[in-house]
Image (cartoon, rainbow, N blue to C red):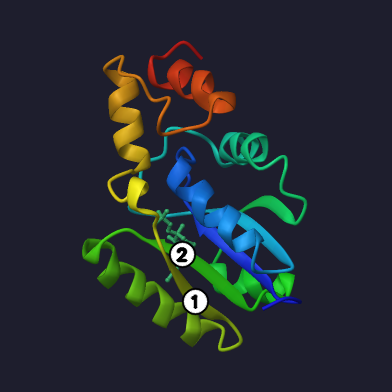
Amino acid sequence: MKNIIALCPGSFDPVTYGHLDIITRSAGMFSKVIVVVAGNASKHCSFTPEERVEMIKKCVADLDNVEVDHYGGLLADYAAQKGATAIIKGLRAMSDFEYEFQMALTNKKLNPNVETLFLTTSAQNMYLSSSMVKQIASMDGDISSFVPDVIKQDIIDRIKGNK
Ligand code: PNS
């Protein structure tokens, strides 16, 4: 699957080890991976798109073929603009499936050149979500096993209202 540009889209509010596992595995399979912070109308985000991009950049600094961007429009249009022909999503459990299936079919309809591929989330990340990380941080819990140290303080500062 070399010579294929793949997108790893998501809200990433904030990025977690679960997302980074999918991004790292994608980087090993595709010539270029673009991590796209995209809009999800049903979610209220704690971080601006720019802040989420900066946090992801800190976490993927050692991956040469990974770029990070944000986009406010349709993912299908972004894929066309960038010449990307794959969208990679991580699947945690059956509860993810219906929503992901709906998005995959919609994106295919909007841009027939793009295929959505699902990677099974690694077992240790099955239960992990950005909202869980924020909830733990808000109650002074330790988020070290869920997010890299380079962004830990950014998350605590925002959730605890320090910044
Ligand atoms: O991490 P999430 O919230 O599950 O990611 C969902 C996301 C951001 C990938 C999805 O909402 C998206 O692609 N948004 C961009 C707008 C878009 O293209 N909407 C139609 C998708 S079917």
For the residues labelled 2 and 1, say whether their Cβ atoms are less than 8 Å apart.
yes
Disc 2 crowd rating (10 Å Cα; few below 14, some 14-19, many 20+) is many
Extreme residue in the top direction: 162
The answer to whether mark 2 is within 8 Å of ligand 1 is yes
- Residue at point 33%, 76% (across, down): 102
In the rendered image, which quarter contains the N terminus? bottom right
Residue 63 relative to residue 122: left or right: right
Residue annotated with mark 2: 89
- Residue at point 48%, 49% (across, down): 19
Residue annotated with mark 1: 116
Front residue of 11 and 118: 118
x and y percentages locating residue 156 in the rendered image: 44, 18
Give the answer, above or below, for where 156 lies relative to 45. Answer: above
x and y percentages locating residue 135 in the rendered image: 28, 28
Q: Identify the secondary structure beneath mark 2.
A: strand
Q: Which of the marked residues, 2 or 1, is nearer the chain's N terminus?
A: 2
Q: Identify the secondary structure beneath mark 1.
A: strand
Amino acid type of disc 1?
Thr
x and y percentages locating residue 39 in the rendered image: 48, 54
Label 2 and label 1: CA atoms lie apart by: 7 Å
- Residue at point 71%, 54% (across, down): 66
Amino acid type of disc 2?
Lys
Extreme residue in the front direction: 123
Q: Quadrant location of residue 78?
A: bottom right
x and y percentages locating residue 112 in the rendered image: 56, 89
